Structure formats: C-alpha cells, structure tokens
Amino acid sequence: MKKIIFAILGIVALFGCQTKYELNTNFTAPTQLDAPELVILDVTSAERVILSWSGGEAEDGGLILYNVLFDAAGGNFSNPLASFQSDKGSQARLTLTHAQLNQIAQAGGVEPNETGDFIWTVIASKGGTDKACGISQTMTLTRGEGIDDNPESLAIAGDAALEAGQVFRKVEDGEFSIVTRLQAGSLYFTEGESRYYLGTSGKLVKGSDSYALATAPSTGLARVTVSFNTLSMKIEEINPTVGAQFAANNVNFLELNYEGNGVFSGSAEVTLLGPGRPNTPSWCSWTEERYSFIANVDGTSVRWGSKFAGSNDAILPDGSEDFYDIHEVQKTDWGNLWKMSHSFDLKAVKITIYTNKDDKFTHTLEETVITPDPGDPTYPEAVSLYGAGAEVEGQSFIKVSTGVYRIYAKLKGGEITVKDDTKTYKTYTCTATPADADATRLTVDLKNDTVTEEVVNKLRCLYGATFEDVVTLAYQGQGVWQGTGTIYFRSVSWGMDERYYFIPTIDGEQSKCWGRLDSVDAENRPDGNQSADYFNCAEFGWEQWYHLWKFASNTDGSNCQITFETNKNGVMTHSVIVQ
C-alpha cells in the first residue's frame, strides 16, 4: 500500500509542479577584436601571442563558446586556413605559440624569411546557434628561417647512428621521436633524398651537412626528438633496462632489456599480488593486478603507463585498439595503470615494448616458455606429498608461485617428503592435525627452504547479507569440503539477497575470505551464461560486501550439494549442484 501511495504522490508532483523550461539562446557576438598587428615569428620562442575580443553577451548570463578562424588577406573564411577553440572553449581570448602561427603562415604560402598578411575573426555559439561577429582584423606574420616541406616520415643516419636507417615514430605533424643506440659522430635525418640536420644556429636546416655529436649517452641508448615545428632537436639518455612493476609494491616483477630497433623485451613467471602471495603488502586483501613500466630518462624515473589517468580508472583489457598504448607521465601512486589479465597469473609471460610500432608507442603480453639458465636453480611445475605423516600418499600440491607450493590435508604427524616423479625436494617432520580441526594448510617454499603449517579449524559457507550458514560443510579428505542442504535466498530490507562466500577459520581466526575472483562478473547469477572461471576462488581479507558470488536462480528453495575443492587441476574452486 505504501508503494502505491508513494507512486501516486510522485505522479502528482510530476504533473502538478512541473515548470516549463526553454533553452535561452539569445546572445550577441563580439564587437571588438584585439591582437598584435605584426608578429616576427621565431618558432623556438616560448613567447605566447594573445588574441582577445570584447562586446557581446548571453541574455541569460550563461556561457558563450568561441571559435577563432584565420584566412589569407582578402579571404572570406568560407574555407579558413586554421580554426581554434578559444582558451578553455569559453574564454574571450586565444593563446597561440609562434609555432602555431608559423604553421598558419606556411599554410598561407609564406616562404621562410618572407612576410604575409592574414585576417582573423571570431564565431560565437550557444545552444547550437552560431553567430559571426561580422568584423575581422589583419595580422601580419613574418617568418624566420624554416623548412616548408615537413617530412611525412624520417629515418636516422650518420656515423653516430649505430642503428642507421631506423625509422622515427611520427608523434604529430612535424614532430618525430626515436629510441636508438648512439655514439659520438655525425648525425642527420633523411626522408628519401632529403636530408636534415641541426645547424650551427641551433636550428634544424635542410642541406647536405650533418650535426657533430661530440658526446655519446653514457648508457649508449638515447631518445632523439626532432621537431620541424620548432626547428629543434633534443637528445635524452635512456637506461636500456625498463622495469615492469605492480603499483601496489613498486617492485619489478619483470625487466625488459633493449633489443634494438626501438624494442624492449623481457620474460618472467608472473604472479599477481594477493593475500598469501609473494611480495604482497600486508594491507592488500584482494587480487592486485595493476601495473606499469618505470623507465629512466635523463636520470629521472618516469612512468610509461596507460591512458587511464585517474587513481581508480585502470581496467582489464577491453579489446580497444589503444588499450596497450603507452604514455610517458610522472610517476604517481595509482595513476596511468593497466590491469593485467588474470589469464597470465602464474604463467611465464613475455612483455614487449615497441617505441615505434606503426607510429604507436605500445606494448604486448604473451605466454612464453622460459629456458632456465643452467647455473640457476630450477623448481618443478608440480609436486606431491608422500610419507608416513601424509593424509594419503601422492596428494598433489597447488602451485602458488615459482618454487612455492600449498596443500590442505589431515596430517598424521611424522616424516613427509615433497617430490615429483624424478626427485625429492624436501623432507620434513610435520605435526599432526589436531583431532578437533579439519585440516592443516602446509606451504612449502623451496626458494627459501621453509615450511609453514597452519591449522584450518573449519570452513563455513555464509550468506553475505546475514552471516548465516548456507549449509554445514564437513571435511571429506584431500583438501575437499562438502555439505548438503536447502538454499533459501535471504529476505533483507532491499529485497531477496542470494550472495555468498566461504570463510575459513585458520589458526583460530576468521579474518580471511575464500571468495570470487576480482576478474569475474559480480552482478549476474550463474544461470548458464557465466564465465568458465566463475566458481574459481582466491583468498582475500574478509570484508562483508567483497568477493561474493550469487547463487543461480534455480537454487532458491532447492536441496543443493556444495563442494569446495582446494586443488582441482591446479585451481581452488567450488560447485553448487541441485539434488
């Protein structure tokens, strides 16, 4: 009844109190223009040229948007040489660089060291209505020395170029960048038969000479940026090793080394961060996959990161063409990161950075096979538990990371061995699992030669909304718990809630959650369209509304068997089956 009353009141409010609103597009265009009448251009100058206007306003006091058009003297702006939004789109001024004005002069046919007249005007707009101000002002532009035939592509050449012929990445019209090996010697740039170099004036020129690079970068690797817009060249020293880091710990999980032709590459076994996983901070109670690259440019660490600038903007791969594109930014805690696909977790991964792949700065990830160095210790992919202290002979461990393995078992106490078909890796005397406990979690770290025992007192399957037991789970052996009972979705203030997770008691504490992977959809019930890994689990810090699954629709009111397996073909997972 309350819902009906509220609905009627809402309709009355909607129709009884509705105010008619019409967009006011009444405004007037500027009536006065102001800017320098003559500009002597120097494309290397940091000076800014300001165009401003006054007069004109919106009747309702709202914002007016402005566009500034340039045309050759005698033109009518029907096909302008250039168009710019005003500063911030709505300010009554436009700030331009000498390089931008030089491009206008060049588009208008003014040769280097010559002068040309141009006109500019303002178009005002509001609510989709445009109004020309009806006046224009002349600006005379005198070009300095310059290069009119800006190349479409560029290659590096000369004795200094150890990778002569390598092609630059085109950053924008007139600007090119390359990461390449350099030594002292002659340096110039080519496009076909055309040749460019940094002249004695410190500006780019076109000709048959070259620039004498007196000192090579100490690392042997440099980034060369060539701008025909500002007639400049910049050389920055690059460290030939780039680190791939998870943002949560700022530790390299993989190093990429320079291979040539602007490419960095490296391979390693990747382990995402999370509770109980190596190098995971104590505060991290979830699976953490956000990463970026840290490069050293001219002695400063910078982030080669994603387009996702905000601290919470990182997403998993979405298939977009520019997802893996790289942007160089200052290093912050959580900005400009990617999320790594969970399919690479506990896999050998090869990452490749391309500083120029079809004019893109980007990277790729792919599974690979790592051939171990003969001098390095090797660790098995799979091991099993044997000995008098084992629950059963031959129970398989789950691989946590390289050299680290975990098993859940009702230990008998006594000697156990960890081995595969060919070798014994560890012999250890274990403690028997207490009689009133379900199992022992045994973690074997062959890298650090340690063994950790934790008692799993019990495992509960709980409704997330009410903390009530869904069913009673009993330990079945070999890391498996199972229980049968009727599932009832819980009636709560917002409706019926079907969310659940598993809460283990480990060493007497209930602080962990065995829950849904972060990469799995949390919104929909598994009614046949769920992902293959929907029921897979990981360990997290326990928070009420995180890492919950939803029961399928057909389980409500049904007798169901819930099975939790700590190692099913190398994966912690569970199942819910209607009986």
Image: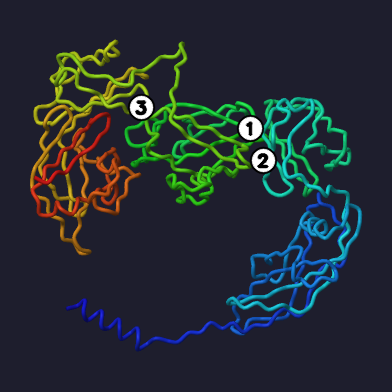
> Element under label 1?
loop
| Label 2 Cα crowd, 10 Å radius (few <14 / some 14-19 / many 20+) | many
Quarter of the image for the C terminus: give it. Answer: top left
Image quarter of the N terminus: bottom left
Tag 3 secondary structure: strand
Residue 196 visible in rendering: no
Dot 3: within a 10 Å radius of its alpha carbon, few (fewer than 14), some, or many (20 or more) residues?
some
Question: Residue 401 got which mark?
Answer: 3
Q: Amino acid at mark 3?
A: Ser
CB within 8 Å, label 2 to label 1: yes
Judging by the rendered image, the residue that carries numbered circle 2 is 169
| Residue at 81% across, 49% down | 44
Q: Residue furthest bottom?
A: 16
Mark nearest the camera among 2 and 3 is: 2
Q: Residue at x 74, y 33 (%)?
A: 156
Query: Of marks 1 and 3, which one's residue comes earlier in the chain?
Result: 1
Q: How many marks?
A: 3
Tell me, yes or no, whether the two marked residues, 2 and 3, touch with CB atoms within 8 Å.
Answer: no
The quarter of the picture where residue 453 lies is top left
Residue shown at 76%/71% (left/top)? 77
- Counting from the top left corner in percent of width and height, residue 98 is at 80, 56
Taking 267 as reference, is 32 above or below it? below
Tag 1: residue type?
Answer: Gly
Per the image, the residue denoted by label 1 is: 262
